[in-house]
Amino acid sequence: MKYIHVDGQERKQMRWADFDYSAQGVYFVTIVTQGRACLFGDVVGDEMVLSAAGQMVMDVYYGLETDNAQCMDMVVMPNHVHFLLYLSHTGNMMLSDFVRDFKSLTTCEYCKGVADSGWPPFTGHLWQRSYWDDIVWNDRMFEFVRRYIALNPSRWTRDAINEGHGPETDHIVAHLKSLR
Protein backbone atom coordinates (compact mmCIF):
# COMPACT_ATOMS: atom_id res chain seq x y z
CA MET A 1 0.00 0.00 0.00
CA LYS A 2 1.38 3.43 -0.92
CA TYR A 3 0.38 7.00 -0.20
CA ILE A 4 1.53 10.45 -1.30
CA HIS A 5 3.31 12.32 1.52
CA VAL A 6 2.88 16.08 1.99
CA ASP A 7 6.25 16.63 0.30
CA GLY A 8 4.80 14.99 -2.84
CA GLN A 9 6.97 11.90 -2.51
CA GLU A 10 5.32 8.49 -2.84
CA ARG A 11 5.93 6.43 0.28
CA LYS A 12 5.10 2.93 1.43
CA GLN A 13 2.47 2.69 4.17
CA MET A 14 4.33 1.55 7.31
CA ARG A 15 1.43 0.62 9.62
CA TRP A 16 -1.59 -1.68 9.51
CA ALA A 17 -4.36 0.63 8.32
CA ASP A 18 -7.15 -0.47 10.69
CA PHE A 19 -5.13 -1.54 13.72
CA ASP A 20 -5.33 0.25 17.07
CA TYR A 21 -1.69 0.80 18.03
CA SER A 22 -2.71 1.49 21.62
CA ALA A 23 -4.12 -2.05 21.85
CA GLN A 24 -2.71 -4.40 24.45
CA GLY A 25 -0.03 -6.58 22.94
CA VAL A 26 3.60 -7.05 22.04
CA TYR A 27 5.24 -5.02 19.29
CA PHE A 28 8.55 -5.66 17.51
CA VAL A 29 10.24 -2.36 16.60
CA THR A 30 13.31 -1.43 14.58
CA ILE A 31 14.70 2.11 14.52
CA VAL A 32 17.68 3.04 12.31
CA THR A 33 20.12 5.93 12.60
CA GLN A 34 20.02 8.65 9.96
CA GLY A 35 22.21 7.64 7.05
CA ARG A 36 22.83 4.33 8.83
CA ALA A 37 25.67 5.99 10.73
CA CYS A 38 27.41 3.55 13.08
CA LEU A 39 27.39 5.46 16.39
CA PHE A 40 26.63 2.94 19.12
CA GLY A 41 29.60 0.57 19.19
CA ASP A 42 31.02 -2.31 17.18
CA VAL A 43 30.31 -5.96 16.60
CA VAL A 44 33.37 -7.94 17.66
CA GLY A 45 33.12 -11.58 16.71
CA ASP A 46 29.52 -12.45 17.52
CA GLU A 47 29.09 -9.88 20.28
CA MET A 48 27.98 -6.26 20.30
CA VAL A 49 30.41 -4.06 22.23
CA LEU A 50 28.50 -0.92 23.17
CA SER A 51 30.10 2.50 23.16
CA ALA A 52 29.02 4.96 25.84
CA ALA A 53 26.42 6.19 23.35
CA GLY A 54 25.15 2.66 22.82
CA GLN A 55 24.84 2.13 26.56
CA MET A 56 22.94 5.40 26.83
CA VAL A 57 20.47 4.19 24.16
CA MET A 58 19.89 0.98 26.12
CA ASP A 59 19.51 2.87 29.41
CA VAL A 60 16.96 5.28 27.90
CA TYR A 61 14.93 2.36 26.53
CA TYR A 62 14.67 0.58 29.87
CA GLY A 63 14.16 3.91 31.65
CA LEU A 64 10.97 4.49 29.65
CA GLU A 65 9.27 1.48 31.22
CA THR A 66 5.98 2.32 32.92
CA ASP A 67 2.89 0.48 34.10
CA ASN A 68 1.58 0.92 30.54
CA ALA A 69 4.73 -0.02 28.63
CA GLN A 70 6.90 -3.00 29.57
CA CYS A 71 10.33 -2.86 27.95
CA MET A 72 11.21 -6.39 26.96
CA ASP A 73 14.13 -7.74 24.92
CA MET A 74 16.38 -5.22 23.19
CA VAL A 75 19.58 -5.13 21.20
CA VAL A 76 21.53 -2.00 20.32
CA MET A 77 23.52 -2.50 17.11
CA PRO A 78 26.08 -0.11 15.57
CA ASN A 79 23.41 1.76 13.59
CA HIS A 80 20.01 0.51 14.75
CA VAL A 81 18.01 -0.93 17.59
CA HIS A 82 15.51 -3.78 17.78
CA PHE A 83 13.17 -4.18 20.71
CA LEU A 84 10.05 -5.93 21.94
CA LEU A 85 7.59 -3.70 23.76
CA TYR A 86 4.48 -4.82 25.62
CA LEU A 87 1.68 -2.26 25.87
CA SER A 88 -0.92 -3.01 28.54
CA HIS A 89 -4.63 -2.34 28.30
CA THR A 90 -4.50 -0.11 31.38
CA GLY A 91 -2.96 2.90 29.67
CA ASN A 92 -3.62 5.15 26.75
CA MET A 93 -0.12 4.94 25.33
CA MET A 94 0.24 4.32 21.62
CA LEU A 95 3.29 2.67 20.10
CA SER A 96 4.08 5.92 18.27
CA ASP A 97 4.10 7.81 21.61
CA PHE A 98 6.69 5.42 23.01
CA VAL A 99 8.88 5.63 19.89
CA ARG A 100 8.61 9.43 19.85
CA ASP A 101 9.72 9.63 23.48
CA PHE A 102 12.55 7.16 22.86
CA LYS A 103 13.86 9.07 19.84
CA SER A 104 13.54 12.44 21.57
CA LEU A 105 15.31 11.40 24.78
CA THR A 106 18.11 9.52 23.02
CA THR A 107 18.69 12.46 20.68
CA CYS A 108 18.93 14.91 23.62
CA GLU A 109 21.28 12.61 25.53
CA TYR A 110 23.37 11.98 22.43
CA CYS A 111 23.74 15.74 21.84
CA LYS A 112 24.96 16.10 25.44
CA GLY A 113 27.47 13.29 24.80
CA VAL A 114 28.76 15.07 21.68
CA ALA A 115 29.23 18.31 23.64
CA ASP A 116 30.52 16.83 26.90
CA SER A 117 32.26 13.58 25.96
CA GLY A 118 33.34 13.95 22.35
CA TRP A 119 30.92 11.40 20.89
CA PRO A 120 30.91 11.42 17.08
CA PRO A 121 28.55 14.14 15.84
CA PHE A 122 25.67 13.38 13.51
CA THR A 123 24.27 15.42 10.65
CA GLY A 124 20.65 16.52 10.71
CA HIS A 125 18.83 13.94 12.82
CA LEU A 126 20.08 11.09 14.98
CA TRP A 127 17.33 8.72 13.78
CA GLN A 128 15.71 8.12 10.42
CA ARG A 129 12.19 9.40 10.00
CA SER A 130 9.60 6.88 11.18
CA TYR A 131 10.38 3.32 12.28
CA TRP A 132 9.53 -0.25 11.33
CA ASP A 133 7.22 -2.33 13.47
CA ASP A 134 5.37 -5.60 13.46
CA ILE A 135 2.63 -6.78 15.77
CA VAL A 136 3.57 -10.02 17.50
CA TRP A 137 0.51 -12.13 16.78
CA ASN A 138 1.33 -15.44 18.49
CA ASP A 139 3.79 -17.38 20.64
CA ARG A 140 5.73 -18.77 17.65
CA MET A 141 6.32 -15.28 16.34
CA PHE A 142 7.25 -14.03 19.83
CA GLU A 143 9.89 -16.75 20.28
CA PHE A 144 11.26 -16.15 16.77
CA VAL A 145 11.64 -12.40 17.43
CA ARG A 146 13.26 -12.96 20.84
CA ARG A 147 15.80 -15.28 19.22
CA TYR A 148 16.34 -12.86 16.32
CA ILE A 149 17.08 -10.03 18.76
CA ALA A 150 19.45 -12.17 20.86
CA LEU A 151 21.35 -13.42 17.80
CA ASN A 152 21.39 -10.11 15.91
CA PRO A 153 25.06 -9.32 16.64
CA SER A 154 26.14 -12.72 15.29
CA ARG A 155 24.18 -12.00 12.08
CA TRP A 156 25.70 -8.54 11.52
CA THR A 157 27.56 -9.55 8.33
CA ARG A 158 24.20 -10.63 6.81
CA ASP A 159 22.15 -7.71 8.13
CA ALA A 160 20.62 -5.58 5.36
CA ILE A 161 20.94 -2.52 7.65
CA ASN A 162 24.73 -3.06 7.68
CA GLU A 163 26.13 -1.10 4.73
CA GLY A 164 28.99 -3.59 4.53
CA HIS A 165 26.90 -6.76 4.54
CA GLY A 166 27.94 -9.70 2.41
CA PRO A 167 26.06 -11.08 -0.58
CA GLU A 168 23.83 -13.20 1.68
CA THR A 169 21.32 -11.13 3.67
CA ASP A 170 18.65 -11.97 6.21
CA HIS A 171 15.05 -11.59 5.10
CA ILE A 172 13.27 -11.27 8.42
CA VAL A 173 10.16 -9.56 7.08
CA ALA A 174 9.26 -12.51 4.84
CA HIS A 175 9.84 -14.91 7.73
CA LEU A 176 7.66 -12.86 10.09
CA LYS A 177 4.82 -12.89 7.54
CA SER A 178 4.99 -16.68 7.47
CA LEU A 179 4.56 -16.79 11.28
CA ARG A 180 1.39 -14.66 11.42
Image (tube, rainbow, N blue to C red):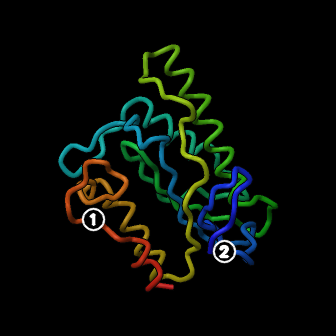
Residue 83: percent from left, percent from top: 50, 57
Label 1 sits on residue: 169
SS at mark 2 in the image: loop
Q: Nearer the viewer, residue 161 or 59?
A: 161
Amino acid type assigned to the residue bearing label 2 in the image: Trp
Amino acid type assigned to the residue bearing label 1 in the image: Thr
Task: Name the residue rendered at 37%, 54% in the picture.
Answer: 161
Q: Nearer the viewer, residue 112 or 11?
A: 11
Q: Compared to 54, does 24 lie above or below?
A: below
Residue 101: percent from left, percent from top: 68, 44
Task: Name the residue rendered at 45%, 16% in the picture.
Answer: 117
Left or right of 155 in this view: 64: right
**Which of the image's four quarters has the N terminus?**
bottom right
Task: Name the residue rendered at 69%, 54% in the picture.
Answer: 8
Label 2 sits on residue: 16
Quarter-of-image position of residue 71 = bottom right
Q: Compared to 14, does 114 lie above or below?
A: above
* Number of marks: 2
Quarter-of-image position of residue 52 = top left
Quarter-of-image position of residue 54 = top left
Task: Estimate the spatial distance between the alpha carbons at disc 2 and disc 1, rounded to whole Å.
Answer: 25 Å
Left or right of 92 in this view: 124: left
